Amino acid sequence: MNIIIKNKLKEIFSILNETPTNINNLGLIDGWCGISLFKKNYSLINSKIKLNNDVEEFLLKNFESYLKNNSFDPHLTNGISGIFWYLSYLKNKRFLYLDNNKFFNDFENYLDKILLSDCEYKNYDILYGSIGTIVFYKESGILHRKKKLQKKIIEIIANQAIYIENNSIRWVFASLRTKSINNDEVNFGLSHGIPSLISCLLKFDREFDNLTRPLVFKSINNILNFENNSDSNYFNYFPDILKVMDNKTTDYKSRLAWCYGDLGIACMLWNAGSRYSVQEWKMKAVDIVIKTTFRKVEEKATLDIGLCHGSAGIAHIYNRFYNYTNDLRIKEASLNWLEKTLELANFSDQFSKYNTNNQDAIVINDPSFLTGMSGVGLSLIGFLNPKTMDWDRCLQIT
């Protein structure tokens, strides 16, 4: 299997290495920083790879001019939070020397204002909202020195909490589509919902635990209240989105994925359990992951290959939990989804031809991190060297 993975990685690198840098799209999630993230990690397992630092050098020398020619997007997907997260990650991995105070200082006041505005508006999306900026602040170390900002954000989150029965709380968020507040929906997604906000709360300094701890415990209580107690191994534990007026329901239609579903909630529970030393949450996370292993790769809802909602993301999360637990059931599931990913990884020698929407029989060019070839490559690298999986911090998997 390792030989097959190495050959596929060689193929991915060859194609991406021949793809010209698009200086008009340097974003982390959809742009060149995400592609470079794969290349850097690939070089860690292949000593023959010699990389230049053209993207990083361009950013460090010409970032202001880049911003003048591009929309001043503050967020993680294609904005400066994502680009800055990537540079901070490279610094932490010793790929790059970077003076955080000197390089990021000019942008912090702007990001602080947008961050607080997003929080006030209940825009807690990781890709297009406040959480993505907090993810960058955490990676760079900036969050640690912003004590007043941390406290302000926590106070906003606490004031927006909706207190319900059974010592539980929940939140409602702004809709990315309509820009309005969805007061009748509870979102269970790690990408756009309450698990993402809980994961964000874990990033604040421990001196604020007296403020964050009650929010985390009560919101996890709320999520666990909606657990599906069906005896069937083929039901998922939690819904994707639940209408408030529906109360509890057994109609939990949710596929395996990073963005929504049981695997994302399991990641959140494991991380929260680790932060607050709650073994019960970590055991629940493992139980959830093991139960999902009964849902086989033939599941029709999983037809994509990428990290977001495809086989590579599923394989990566199983690989994570296998490295946590050494549970052979989880290992088997990780290898099954790895095989599915390799099966889907078909492309021509002209450019990446990954199936990212197989349901509609569409094959599109997608070299990106979240839905395309770069993310697939990062998932594969993790099977050869688990120490390279730390990039998943930007998706709050860890």
Image (cartoon, helix red, strand yellow):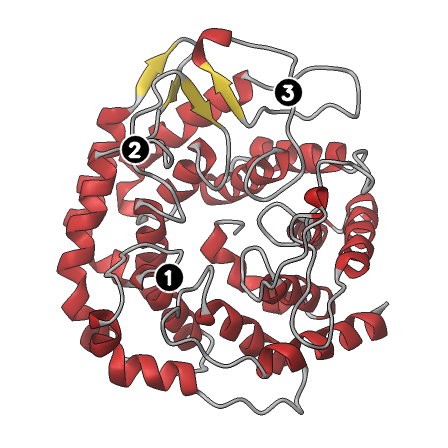
Task: Please give left or right for residue 22 compared with residue 118 in the image.
Answer: right
Identify the secondary structure beneath mark 1. Answer: helix
Please tell me which residue is depicted at 35% across the width and 24% down the height of the picture. Answer: 172
Where residue 56 sits: x, y (%)?
Answer: 38, 81
**Alpha-carbon span between mark 3 and mark 2:** 26 Å
Position of 362 relative to 4 (above/below): above
Identify the secondary structure beneath mark 2. Answer: loop
Find disc 1 in the rendering and name its residue: 82
- Give the mark, 3 or 2, whose residue is nearer the N terminus: 2
Relative to the observer, which residue lies in front, 59 or 140? Answer: 59
Where residue 10 sits: x, y (%)?
Answer: 72, 79
* Visible residue check, residue 97: no
- Give the mark, 1 or 2, whose residue is nearer the N terminus: 1
**Residue 300 occupies which quadrant of the picture?**
top right
Dot label at residue 179: 2
Q: Amino acid at mark 3?
A: Tyr
Of the residues tagged 1 and 2, which is closer to the observer? 2
**Residue 91 occupies which quadrant of the picture?**
bottom left
Find disc 3 in the rendering and name its residue: 252
